[in-house]
Image (tube, helix red, strand yellow):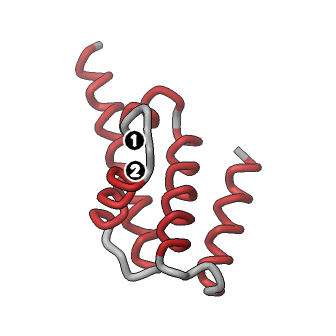
Amino acid sequence: MFSAIQHKQQNVVETVYLALSDHARLFGFTAEDIMDFWQHKAPQKYSAFELAFEFGHRVIAELILNTLNKMAESFGFTDNPRYIAEKNYMEALLKKG
């Protein structure tokens, strides 16, 4: 049982990392850049891992969207067509979920 829980935790961490990596490349950032920005600039009660594990993959999508929004706004990307398209795509995914 314990190893099954560890395996699930590993899958959640990998999912978060891969999703952040994919979306970060659209803006020329690495996943580490995004994680660092989110950890130091966004107030949080729980870590990304705790949120993802407790509430499931919807939280992962929300974390990615919120992180991208904060980074894009801080770097002035809000009028970028790629930013707008990605934001709309992630919001549509959240509505379906």
Horizontally, residue 2 falls left or right of residue 71, namely: left
Question: Circle 1 sits in a helix, a strand or a loop, which is it?
Answer: helix
Q: Quadrant of residue 10?
A: top left
Horizontally, residue 32 falls left or right of residue 86, namely: left
Residue 2 in picture, x, y percent from top left:
25, 15
Q: Is residue 69 above or below residue 42?
A: below
Question: From the image, which quarter does the N terminus lie in?
Answer: top left
Q: Residue furthest left?
A: 3
Mark 1 crowd level (few <14, some 14–19, many ≥20, 10 Å Cα) = some
Question: Circle 2 sits in a helix, a strand or a loop, which is it?
Answer: helix
Q: Nearer the viewer, residue 25 or 11?
A: 25
Q: Residue furthest top?
A: 1
Instruction: Indicate the amino acid at tag 2.
Output: Val
Residue 48 numbered tag: 1
Residue at position x 31%, y 67% from top? 33
Q: Label 2, on which residue?
A: 16
Mark 2 crowd level (few <14, some 14–19, many ≥20, 10 Å Cα) = many
Residue at position x 53%, y 30% from top? 55
Q: Nearer the viewer, residue 48 or 42?
A: 42
Residue 75 in picture, x, y percent from top left:
47, 79
Residue at position x 40%, y 50% from top? 16
The answer to the question of whether label 1 and label 2 lie on touching residues, with beta carbons closer than 8 A, is yes
Question: From the image, which quarter does the C terminus lie in?
Answer: top right
Residue 44 in picture, x, y percent from top left:
43, 39
Mark 1, mark 2: which one is toward the viewer?
Answer: 1
Mark positioned earlier in the residue sequence (1 or 2): 2
